[in-house]
Amino acid sequence: MKKNLFLFVILLLASAGIFAQQAVYLARKSKVSFQSDAPLELIKASSTKLQGAIDVTKRTFAFSIPTDSFKGFNSPLQQEHFYENYIEAKAYPVSTFEGKIIEQVDLLNDGNYSVRAKGKLNIHGVEQERIIKVQLRISQGVIYAQTNFSVLLQDHNITIPKVVFQKIAEEIKVIVAVEFGKKQQ
C-alpha cells in the first residue's frame, strides 16, 4: 500500500511538471484531522500519513493521503465502519488534492501569507473543484501550511444510512497542518 501511494504521488507530481523544477518542497511532517459533530455523537480521527509537494516557482501542489490511515475513533468498530461502509478504503485507497496557489506570492521569502489553493479534491472517487484558504508561514527555508475547511459528504457520494443519521454529520470539518522542506537533489 505504501509503495502504491508513493508511486501515485511520484506520478502525480511528474504529470504536473513539478520535478522539472529545482524549487520543490516535500511534506516532512503532517497531520490531517477530521471531525463529525452530529446531534448524538462526536467523531474525531487523524492521520500523519499525508504526502505531497509544492513547486514554489510555479506555485503548484499535489497531495495524497491513504484513506485507511485515520486513527482515533470512539471505538474499533466505528473505525471499521468508517473504512468499510463510508470511505470504502479498499475501493478508494487514496484521497488527493492537486492544483495551484492563486496568489502571486514569492514562496522563497520568509513571511506570513494568506493564500488560496485552487484545485481538484478527490475523496471517495469523486473529484470536486475547490478553493481552500491556507495560512503559510515561511521561515529559513521551511514552509508551514495550515488550513481548515468543510467537506459535504453528499458532494463525494458518501451516504449515511438512516439508522445512524443522528450519529454522523453531513458536513465534516477537516484541519490540515503540514511542514515542507526543500527536496534534496
Image (cartoon, grey):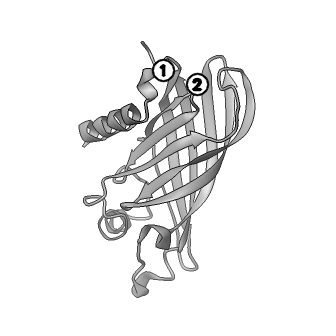
Look at the numbered discs 1 and 2 and tell me whether their residues touch, using CB distance below 8 Å: yes
Residue 81 in percent (x, y) is at 33, 69
Residue neighbourhood size for the residue with mark 2, other residues' Cα within 10 Å, grouped as few (<14), some (14–19), many (≥20): some
What kind of element bears circle 2? Answer: loop
The residue at the point 45 percent across, 41 percent down is 63
The residue at the point 45 percent across, 36 percent down is 52
The disc labelled 2 sits on which kind of residue? Thr
The disc labelled 1 sits on which kind of residue? Gln
Task: Check disc 1 and report the residue beneath it.
Answer: 21
In the visual, does 25 lie left or right of 75? right
Quadrant in the picture for the C terminus: top left
Q: Residue reaching furthest bottom?
A: 162
The residue at the point 33 percent across, 53 percent down is 68
The one of 40 and 100 positioned closer to us in this rendering: 100
The one of 168 and 10 positioned closer to us in this rendering: 10
In the visual, does 128 lie left or right of 105? left
Residue 121 in percent (x, y) is at 48, 54
The tag earlier along the polypeptide, 1 or 2, is 1
- Which picture quadrant has residue 139? top right
Task: Check disc 2 and report the residue beneath it.
Answer: 57
What kind of element bears circle 1? Answer: loop
Residue neighbourhood size for the residue with mark 1, other residues' Cα within 10 Å, grouped as few (<14), some (14–19), many (≥20): few
Total number of numbered discs in the rendering = 2
- The correct choice, above or below, for 9 with respect to 95 in the image is above
The one of 30 and 59 positioned closer to us in this rendering: 59
Residue 145 in percent (x, y) is at 62, 37
Quadrant in the picture for the N terminus: top left
The residue at the point 53 percent across, 57 percent down is 129
